[in-house]
Image: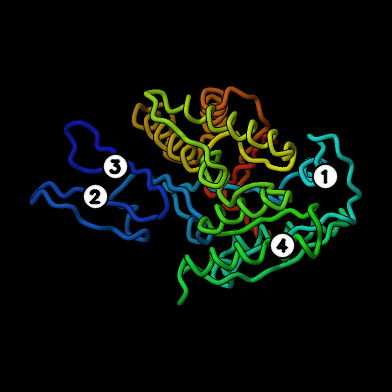
Amino acid sequence: MLFVTRGDSRVKVTYDGITYEAFSAIKEDEVWSWYSYEEYAEHIELVISRSISNPHTADTEGLFILASQYGAERNPVRLRQTLSDIGNGIRVSRPKLTIIHYSFPRHMSQVLLSGRRDRMLQRANELGIRFVDVTAPDPTGEAGLPGTQQFILEDVPKQIATYGTQTAFFGTNCGMQIPLLRRVFEGRAIYPQPCDPSPYHAYPAALGIQTYASENVLNTLRFVVEETRRIAAENSMTGRLSNWPVSSPIMFTHLGVEYIIRYLNGETPRSPVNNALLDRLTREHIQEAAGVEVEFNWTPYAEAGVTYNNYLLMRMGFITY
């Protein structure tokens, strides 16, 4: 998304949904020129992006990144609530719980994804939960996405047969989620969240929810959440599935655009990040989109004693279906 102020041919700010690159309009010949991330600063005033890329590349004034922090980052009580089926009134001793973590080397080479896996393992060890790494085929490999999905379809039942139904499954790739949720649902296991939290991610396709077009997209979101709850209840899966109440990609796009509008209107400076504004916009979006109050916070990424104040990670409370 490119934002140009009236009477000025140059792009002032941009929201980029997945990468750092930006564009700038050149008035003289009315063509678009490409600027790499490293070159953008002298041409564009502010870039907002969402990404899972290396946070070390984001240490530049005028750029800030929104990213999800989920899975193991829940506090021990919340993790235990999800994995122990508290919502269904079932009490399960922690040593009987297992987490299956599906990924592949390319994803584990990314700092945020491998860091999440490490924190999941650490938290599981603290709670006495068995943690099992399973390497799945990379969807960019020779067998492609079908190969990855076929592996998930075949492996999940084997893991449930080995560890039982008190097994939580998590996969790091979007293409895994539909077959993963289908097999978890069939096997009455546990699905804490899709890799990118969203009521739209995997649930409608895996559970056969027929979404509908609405002038108000929020009506569709709430419909999907309620249908997921209904289907879970009808199949004795209440308390075994959870998610964020809102779509993380849609939320980040919304927040990026709303923040940019405030910047163009002179309501917030280019830097540093206006955390109070970001918090307010986040709270308003969650309330409008989901109609619920959930805890959330933005924290800057930190590693080896270095804090990246413009690489913000989102933690959010979850809903249990």
Tell which circle, 4 or 2, labels the residue nearer the N-terminal end.
2
Tell which circle, 2 or 1, labels the residue nearer the N-terminal end.
2
- Please indicate, yes or no, whether residue 177 appears anywhere in the rendered image: yes
* Relative side of 230 to 94, left or right: left
Quadrant for residue 267, please give it.
top left
Q: Which residue is mark 1?
A: 84
Q: Which residue is mark 4?
A: 118
Marks 1,4: beta carbons within 8 A: no
Residue occupying image coordinates x 77% and y 63%:
161
Marks 3,4: beta carbons within 8 A: no
Question: Hey, what amino acid is under mark 2?
Answer: Ser
Q: Nearer the viewer, mark 2 or mark 3?
A: 3
Q: How many marks?
A: 4
Instruction: Work out whether residue 56 or residue 126 is closer to the camera in this orientation and state it.
Output: 126
Q: Which element is circle 3 on?
A: strand
* Relative side of 149 to 36, left or right: right
Tell which circle, 1 or 3, labels the residue nearer the N-terminal end.
3
- Label 1 to label 4, Cα distance in Å? 21 Å
Tell which circle, 2 or 3, labels the residue nearer the N-terminal end.
3
Q: Which mark is residue 124?
A: none
Q: Which residue is mark 3?
A: 2
